[in-house]
Amino acid sequence: MGVSARDLRELILRALPEEASSYGGWPEPRHVYFPPSHTKALRPDAMVVIGIRGSGKSFWWSALQEPHIRKMIARIDKSIQIEESTEVHIGFGPVSRIENYPSKDAIYSLLRDGKSPRMLWKTVAVWNLLSDKLPSIRGWRERIDWVEEHPEEIARHLEEKDRKLQQRGAWALILFDAMEQAAEDRETMYNLIRGLLQIALELRPTRRIRLKCFLRPDQFDEPRVAAFPDASKVIASRVFLNWTRPDLYGLLWQYLANEEDADEFRKWAAQKARIQWDLIQVNGQIIYQWPRNMREDEESHRSLFHQIAGPWMGRDPKRGFPYTWLPGHLADAHGRTSPRSFLIALRVAAEDTKTRYPDHRLAIHYESIKRGVQQASRIRVSELREDYPWIEDLMAPLRGLVVPCDFKEIKTRWREQNVLETLKQKKMLPPSIEEGEEGLRKDLEAMGIFLRMEDGRVNIPDVFRIGYGLGRRGGVKPIREA
């Protein structure tokens, strides 16, 4: 039984989306993969779900809205407690839904007029959960006023709702995502998140109603967002969306195995890795998954990937091994690798091999993997720029620097560019800017961009270093400005 290198390469190009924006978009059942930490995050009692950009926050925010995916979740793992019948409401997200929640401009207007974040989100929760019991009011200002004036009526309706859900054995979830899009500045964002967590706490005593808040690590700043009584009860529910190395490869196999005309690949992979695919049927569609009892078996993932990319990142083992090299060079300073970056790097590697090494005996050339990492770094840097408008002011002056380096070199460049003064003119400021350059260093370390070495020097992981144009002796070449 054989699958040619060309066949594998073409399968990768068909299965992995060409556009970076396609990853994390509206989910297809065939691409739904369940790392262990995500299983915990989907449970109703996990009220706070934390993940870096591209780790799956918006994916699950979207997926939970789909009845057929909830049905799939129930079939795969009953312990998650998510069913097709689970009620899912949207409390905030990246797309406008004015009937479900106010827009950013409306939120700004409401806060300016003295409406508290807590009451704003309580009104959003109430109007999503109890719309059939409430008067017909269109404006959010008027809705907040009504909620403020009818606390007992709302309490009774919520008790009745909870009782009916309990009788049915069902849950009602209200999902919140993209909180950075709800505010113009960091303090307002923190205030909104604190108000949201207060409502999560207030609904916690119910048996079947839960808020689920998807947040970036920097948004869950405990001193700022958890400064209210009994906040620890919400904090204790938090779950981090992590991706281990086997999780990343398991996701890759799921993309490849469920692509159209992938029969030969599935047979080939089953033979090479000595596995038997798990099958699940959803709405008449058969979905192939890496066997659950072998998800953490790194040797099976390694042997299969090395059939695709070869055993070494060069002509001998000294250059490293593709299975560990790829996710390692895409990880931040905390060891977190975005699955989006991982899949982008692999697709680019397949494209590059097809163009530069069309007759290569393997599906992916090791030099192409390096170029895939370069492109993934470019996209990761672009994402950072979107999420943190101030990041470019910190990183642009460092272009051409060779790391690891002494922090004094970085401070010198920042001072030459008047970075502190420039940042203070922006609306969205770094969290620790008041602590000066050491505060900025602390913020970049928290984000996983800077790594403090034992000797005090600063290192920068390749996933950021390459895209920002910094050098490292013997490392993947940085991207040069055009």
Image (cartoon, helix red, strand yellow):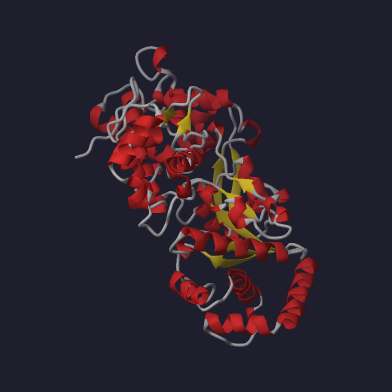
x, y (%) of residue 168? 77, 67
The residue lying furthest to the left in this view is 482
Identified at 59% across, 41% down, the residue is 35
| Residue 344 found in image quarter | top left
The residue lying furthest to the bottom in this view is 136
x, y (%) of residue 314? 35, 17
> In this figure, what is the number of numbered marks?
0
| Residue 299 found in image quarter | top right
Q: Is residue 85 visible?
A: no
| Residue 199 found in image quarter | bottom right
Q: Is residue 165 visible?
A: yes
x, y (%) of residue 435? 48, 45
x, y (%) of residue 20? 37, 47
Looking at the rendering, in which quadrant would you find the C terminus? top left
Using residue 407 as the reference point, say whether residue 126 is left or right of it. Answer: right
| Depth check, front residue: 284 or 365 | 365
In the rendered image of this protein, does residue 342 appear above or below residue 18?
above
Identified at 45% across, 54% down, the residue is 25
Identified at 40% across, 35% down, the residue is 463
